[in-house]
Image: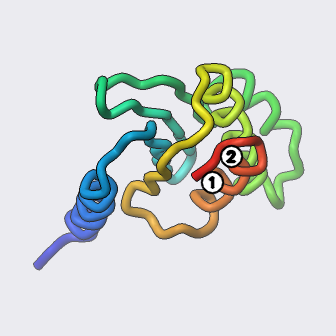
Amino acid sequence: MITKYERYHLRKERTRRKLFERGITKPRLSVKRSNKYVYAQLIDDSKGVTLAFASTVEKELSDKIKKMNKSAKCIEACKILGETIAKRAIEKGVKEVIFDRGGRIYHGRVKAVAEAARTAGLKF
């Protein structure tokens, strides 16, 4: 029997394989979420380097998150994360990216990060 983690890992590999089949010419915006935190990084796969990184663990973001209303804290934190990663990407000169949802469905926190990054100026 396949475990829950193995199913997630297969979905993640399938998503990544589809991205690479198309031929990656743009950096990849990868989103990872855990039960407590969300991480986003901008990766240049041709060089194998991370161009920008942001997470809800960072001091400046966690200070903003702590000031928020508790009822909508999760989604709002992800919106701040999306804006932050977009701002850092634009500072590095990156305007177009490929979105890698990391095997998760495009819903909730993952969707909030993507939409906030789009509104902040990144093109997917």
Using the image, tell me which numbered label, if any, was put on residue 114: 1
Tell me, for residue 117, which label it has, or none: 2
Vertical placement of 112 versus 31: above or below? below
| Disc 2/disc 1 C-alpha distance (Å) | 5 Å
Above or below: residue 104 compared with residue 73: below
Residue 42 in the image: x percent, y percent? 49, 34
Rendered-image quadrant of the N terminus: bottom left
User: Where does the image place residue 18, in percent across and percent down from the top left?
Assistant: 29, 61
Q: Is residue 100 above or below residue 8?
A: above
Q: Position of residue 3 (x, y in %)?
A: 20, 70
Tag 1: residue type? Answer: Ala
Local secondary structure at mark 1: helix
Is residue 73 left or right of 81 when viewed as pictured? right
Q: Secondary structure at mark 2?
A: helix
Q: Quadrant of residue 64?
A: top right
Q: Nearer the viewer, residue 51 or 62?
A: 51
Q: Outermost residue, left direction?
A: 1
State the residue at coordinates (53%, 39%): 40
* Count of number-bearing discs: 2
Left/right of residue 68 with respect to residue 33 in the rendered view: right
Mark 1 residue crowding within 10 angstroms, few (<14) / some (14–19) / many (20+): many
Assess whether mark 1 and mark 2 are in contact (beta carbons under 8 angstroms): yes
Identified at 48% across, 23% down, the residue is 51
What is the three-letter code of the residue carrying label 2?
Ala
